[in-house]
Amino acid sequence: MHGNGRQTRTMSPEPKRPNFRHVELAQKILDVAGERGMAPGERLAEQALASLCKVSRTPIRKALQILAERDMVTSDSEGGYLLAVDPAATARLEDITDGDGDSEIYAAILRDLAAGRIAENQTVAALQRRYNVSRQTVQNALMKLAEENLAERGAGQQWLLKHFAISGDAAAKSYEFRLATEPLALTLPDFKRDMPAMTALRQSMLILRGMNETNFDRKLFDRTDYDFHLLIARSCGNPFMAEALANHHRRRRASPPAGHVNAYRLMQSNLEHIQILEQIERGQMELAADLMRVHIQLSQSQRPRLAGRGVPPAFKLVVR
C-alpha cells in the first residue's frame, strides 16, 4: 500500500511467444509421425525423435510442449507424450506465430528483395537500421531464410539473399528444374518405396478429394503437396538428387506465391497426386514418371479448368 492509499496491482506478464524454431521442430515431429504412419495413442519417444530430427532432446521437449498446448499430443503416465491426432489429416502449424517480430521482418526482407528495394548482399547491422528492430530479430529472420535456402552466410558479417529464388521468372525456372529432375527421380534404380509414408499421404489426399471448391482446405493441400514431393525426393535413392530436390521444395514452399491458383486446379492437382502415388505403389515407375511430367506441366500452366472437362485423359484412371 502506497502513502496515497491506493493499492498497487501486480500485472501478470504476457505469455511468452514460442520460438519459431521450436514451432518448426513441432511441425517436423508431426511430419515424421505422418511419414511413419503413426496413429493417435502411439508413444513419441524423445530420443528417437531427436535422432530423426538431428537435434538434441532439449529442443524436442520444447517442441512437444508446443504440441501439447495445441492438444496434438497428451502426457502419458511415464512422463512422455502420446500422439493425440492423425498427423496425416492435420493442417500445418503456422511456421511463426502471428504478430511475431521475426515473422514480420522475414516477410519484409522477402518483399523488399523481390521489389529490388534492397541488394542481395546485406549485413545484420544494415537490416537492423532499415527495419529498426533488434539484432536477434534480424538474425532469427536470416536463419529462417537460410534454412529455406533463400539466404546464405557470406564472408565476415555478410549475408547473401537469393533474389533469383523469388524473382519474376523464378516460378518458370522452378518448373524447368522440376521437369528435368522429378520424373527422373521416379525411375532411378535405387528408388525405395516407403509404404507407410505413402499410406499416410493417401489418407490426406482422400480427405481432400472429398471436399468441394467451397470448403477446400488449402492449408491441408499445401502440406500434402509438400509432403508428397518431399517423399519422392527422399525415396529416389540418389543422395545428390534427394538433397537438391528437398532443398528446392523447401524453398518453393517458403517463397511468396507467384499468383492465385483457383480451388478447382488444386483439387485437380490432388487427383494427379493420387494417380502418381497409385502407380508408385504398383511399381509402375515409368508410368508414374510420365504422370509426374504431365502434372508439372499442368501446374505450370495454372489455367482454371471446368469441372468434368479439366482432367486430362492420362489421369482418368480408377482410384481405389
Image: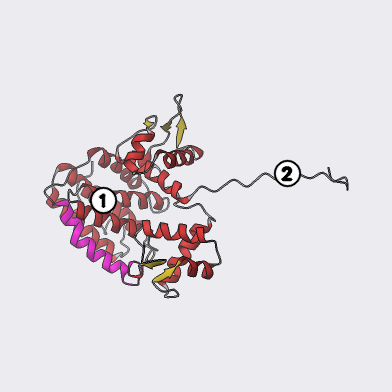
Image color mode: secondary structure
Residue under numbered circle 1: 273
Q: Which of the two residues, 88 or 139, is positioned nearer the viewer here?
A: 139
Name the one closer to the observer, 171 or 157.
157
What is the x, y in percent for residue 251?
33, 59
| Residue found 11% across the figure and 48% down from its top | 189
The answer to which quarter of the image holds residue 294 is bottom left
- Badge 2: few (under 14), some or many (20 or more) residues near its Cα, within 10 Å? few
Asked if residue 38 lies in the magenta stretch, the reply is no
Q: Amino acid at mark 2?
A: Thr
Q: Is residue 184 left or right of residue 129?
A: left
Q: Which residues are magenta?
A: 165-188
Name the residue at 33% across, 49% down. 224
What's the amino acid at mark 1?
A: His
Q: Residues within 10 Å of mark 1 (few under 14, many from 20)?
A: many
In the image, residue 57 sits, relative to residue 247, either above or below, namely: above
Q: Main secondary structure of the magenta part?
A: helix
Look at the image and say whether residue 181 sits in the magenta stretch: yes
Q: Which residue, given by chain and number where applicable, does mark 2 sit on?
A: 10
Real-space CA distance between mark 2 and mark 1, rounded to the nearest whole angstrom: 56 Å
**Local secondary structure at mark 1:** helix
x, y (%) of residue 41?
Answer: 39, 29
Looking at marks 2 and 1 on the same chain, the residue that comes earlier in the sequence is marked by: 2
Residue situated in front as seen by the camera: 96 or 204: 96
Residue at the (24%, 48%) spot, across then down: 234
Residue 33: % across, % down: 34, 38
Relative height, residue 88 to residue 124 (above, below): above
Whether residue 217 is visible to the viewer of this picture, yes or no, is no
